[in-house]
Amino acid sequence: MARHLIQGREVATPVRIRDAMACTASYLVRADAARAVIAYSGLDVVEVLPGKALCTLAFLDYTEGDLGAYHEFGVTFLVRPPEAGPAPRRGLRRGLSELLRDGAGVFVHWLPVDQGFTLEAGRTIWGFPKELADIDLRLSSPYKRCVVRQDGRLVLDLLLRPGLPVPAPGLTARTDAYTHLDGVTRRVPWSVAPRGGRVRPAGALIRLGNHPVARELSELGLPGGAFLTATASHVTMRFEEAKTL
């Protein structure tokens, strides 16, 4: 067990999130554009279809955990593990669950939060690219909405329509999250257990603002239709100690 001193408070890994609500919208984007966006990391995206990568936008309401209560928004990409070697030949890729079993992970490209403690903890412990932003979550109705603003500029306004219930008793997904900060890429073993899940094809409405991240998303092809949207009313997570690549 490693211990970290954050703003005068000790945080030990693994860090546990005991309850959160999570909402995601996944998009099939041009693989060449996605590679250009994350080139700084030294990682490569997974082509889930020929010429297509998976970009997922996520917003979360953390209500109980080792880092306190806060809101978070994330821009992530499905990536190949660094040790995977040359990319496979183009062609129809395998299912997502098989890709994860083979070591595909989630690269966290941008991760604004609305509280200073989790910002410092995330950057210090794991190298997560956390930044402060205004994150307005509206989660009380079946429609879930997230509005992100930073430095007075709109990043995006994202609305998710409700999906169909997906029973997942006892399901725990284990994968690696990848981060890059101050020139260093890290691997973070990560597990997540959702309950109260709903999933549907499409189901997202998005309006982009004039923030640089909004322009980046536009270059990826957003606000085109989402491939898949998902919500989970209760999520627990566990983040292990980061390892430098």
Image (cartoon, rainbow, N blue to C red):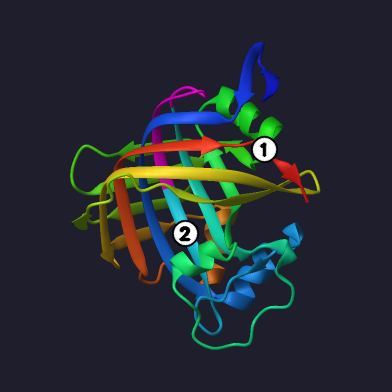
The residue shown at (69%, 21%) is 3
The residue shown at (50%, 44%) is 191
Q: Is residue 106 left or right of residue 63?
A: right
- Whether residue 65 appears in magenta in the rendering, the answer is yes
Task: Identify whether 221 is placed above or below 9.
Answer: below
Q: Is residue 212 visible?
A: yes
Residue 199 screen position, x and y as percent: 27, 59
Amino acid type shown at disc 2: Thr
Residue 125 screen position, x and y as percent: 68, 32
Q: Nearer the viewer, mark 1 or mark 2?
A: 1
Q: Which quadrant does the N terminus fall into?
A: top right
Regarding mark 2 in the picture, which secondary structure is present there? strand
N-term mark: 1 or 2: 2
Depth order, front residue of 159/107:
107
Q: Is residue 76 left or right of residue 170?
A: right
Q: Which mark is residue 220?
A: none
Q: Which mark is residue 56?
A: 2
Task: Identify whether 124 is placed above or below 144.
Answer: above
* Span of residues in magenta: 59-69
In 3D space, how far apart are the residues under numbered discs 1 and 2 (Cα atoms)?
Answer: 20 Å
Residue 172 screen position, x and y as percent: 41, 47
Q: Is residue 153 visible?
A: no
Amino acid type shown at disc 1: Trp
The residue shown at (50%, 73%) is 29
Residue 124 screen position, x and y as percent: 70, 31
Quarter occupied by residue 116? top right
- Whether residue 66 appears in magenta in the rendering, the answer is yes
Task: Identify whether 46 is placed above or below 105.
Answer: below
Q: Is residue 78 left or right of residue 192?
A: right
Depth order, front residue of 160/44:
44
Q: Which mark is residue 126?
A: 1
- How busy is the neighbourhood of tag 1: few (under 14 within 10 Å), some, or many (20 plus)? many
